């Protein structure tokens, strides 16, 4: 049984996967910085830094919406196959199990979106 509204779930899951995308971008920045095989790494570093900046700004906005909605997403457990998260919203709760390859696809989708939109004005808005 579902206890969260679609908009609450969309807000929480965007926050969750965007947070994961930020971690991936930050790790990639460290890897590229260490990497010796890049002849010219600055453009890649700049792209990732702009992506990170945009993602962090969006996550800040999402966090504000979540506070207004009294919405929290809490990691419960993780194994090789699935990861579980608890969504809490205004006294209601819903546990979601995600297949780890699906998480990866969602994070990749956000990274691609950030990559494509990094030079465009920010226009990611949520309807509450």
Image: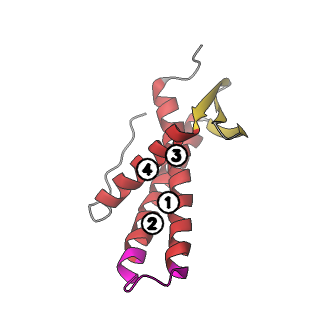
The answer to whether the residues at label 2 and label 1 have Cβ atoms under 8 Å apart is yes
**Residue name at image x 40 percent, y 81 percent:** 41
The residue pinned by badge 2 equals 53
The image quarter containing residue 91 is top right
Which quadrant of the figure contains the N terminus?
top right
Q: Is residue 119 above or below residue 70?
A: below
Looking at the rendering, the stretch of residues picked out in magenta corresponds to 33-45
Does the magenta run of residues contain 108? Answer: no
Q: Which mark is residue 17?
A: 3
Q: 113 or 38: which is nearer to us?
A: 38
**Residue at x 70%, y 39% (from the top left corner):** 79
Sequence-wise, the earlier of marks 2 and 4 is 2
**In this picture, residue 2 sits left or right of residue 127:** right
Q: Looking at the image, is mark 3 or mark 4 nearer the viewer?
A: 4
User: In the current view of this chain or complex, which residue is farthest to the left?
Assistant: 120
The residue singled out by tag 1 in the image is 56
Q: Residues within 10 Å of mark 1 (few under 14, many from 20)?
A: some
Q: Is residue 89 at least partly visible in the picture?
A: no
Crowd around label 4: few <14 · some 14–19 · many ≥20 (10 Å): some
Instruction: Give the distance between the C-alpha atoms of the residues marked 3 and 1, in whole angstroms.
Output: 12 Å
Identify the secondary structure beneath mark 3.
helix
Between label 2 and label 4, give the one nearer the viewer: 4
Magenta stretch: includes residue 42:
yes
Q: Cα distance, mark 3 to mark 2?
A: 16 Å
State the SS at label 1. Answer: helix
Nearest to viewer (mark 1 / mark 4) = 4
Cα–Cα gap, marks 2 and 1: 5 Å
Look at the numbered disc 4 and give the secondary structure of its residue: helix
First reached walking from the N terminus: tag 1 or tag 4: 1
């Amino acid at each position: 049984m579902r206890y969260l509204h679609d908009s609450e779930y969309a807000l929480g899951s965007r926050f969750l996967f965007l947070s994961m995308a930020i971690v991936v971008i930050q790790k990639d920045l460290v890897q590229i910085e260490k990497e010796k095989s890049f002849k010219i790494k600055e453009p890649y570093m700049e792209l990732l830094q702009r992506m990170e900046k945009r993602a962090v700004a969006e996550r800040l906005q999402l966090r504000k919406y979540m506070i207004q909605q009294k919405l929290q997403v809490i990691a419960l457990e993780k194994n090789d196959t699935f990861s579980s998260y608890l969504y809490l919203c205004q006294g209601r709760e819903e546990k979601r199990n995600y297949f780890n390859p699906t998480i990866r696809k969602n994070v990749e989708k956000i990274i691609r979106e950030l990559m494509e939109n990094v030079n465009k004005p920010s226009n990611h808005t949520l309807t509450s």
